[in-house]
Image: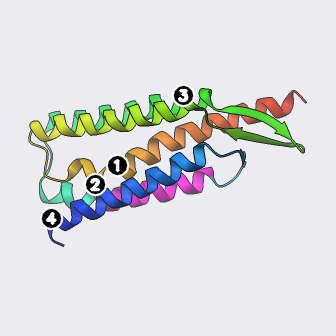
Amino acid sequence: MIPGVTVGVNVVIGLAVLALLLYRQLQPRRVREDGALRLTVILLVVGVIQAYPVVSNHPPTTIVVLLLLAGLVSGAVFGTLRAYTTKLWIKDEDVWRQGTWLTLVLWLVAVGLHFGIDYLSERQGAPAGLGSSTIVLYLAVTLGIQRFITQQRAVKLRATV
């Protein structure tokens, strides 16, 4: 593939996934006890597939790897925070959830931080397109943590009824 086209495709895929996630976060939805792991694994696989060509053609320096890891850790932290801003309630014997305005703000800050870390990575010699190629991987980590904690909260809520 042509490098510029690959970056563009990765950005479009990442933004499409983010838009869908934001929309779904703010809608009332039943908390499912299955499926969260499946979506996380799918996003992880897509994220690795997108990042591999960029990394294999130009191995990142140690500082770039550390910045990427910092980005993934920040994703886990923001996923944890968002999980606790999500409203949970019981309706028709099921646990439901809906993100709040704070959930949305945390998403936007987290994605902004991800792009900020990508910018720093590029300044440290990261291969072109590394940031855009890792956005789906980042979303897998942050969403996976958020969903796991939300499910644990739902189990506890269900146990109180």
Please name the amino acid that badge 4 sits on.
Answer: Pro
Neighbours of disc 4 within 10 Å: few (<14), some (14-19), many (20+): few
Instruction: Tell me the mark number nearer the camera, choosing from 1 and 3.
Output: 3
Question: Between marks 2 and 4, how big is the CA–CA gap?
Answer: 11 Å
Q: Are marks 1 and 2 in contact (CB under 8 Å)?
A: yes
Which badge, 1 or 3, comes first in the chain's sequence?
3
Residue found at x 86% / y 41%: 91
SS of the residue under disc 1: helix
Residue 23 forms part of the magenta stretch:
no
Give the vertical position of 22 relative to 152 (above or below): below
Side of 34 where 41 appears, left or right? left
Please name the amino acid that badge 3 sits on.
Answer: Leu
Question: Between marks 3 and 4, how big is the CA–CA gap?
Answer: 37 Å
Start-end of magenta stretch: 36-51
- Which disc is residue 3 wearing? 4
Q: Are marks 1 and 4 in contact (CB under 8 Å)?
A: no
Task: Give the residue pinned by disc 3.
Answer: 102
Give the vertical position of 159 relative to 141 (above or below): above
Which badge, 2 or 4, comes first in the chain's sequence?
4
Please name the amino acid that badge 1 sits on.
Answer: Ile
Task: Give the residue pinned by disc 1.
Answer: 135
Residue 50 forms part of the magenta stretch:
yes
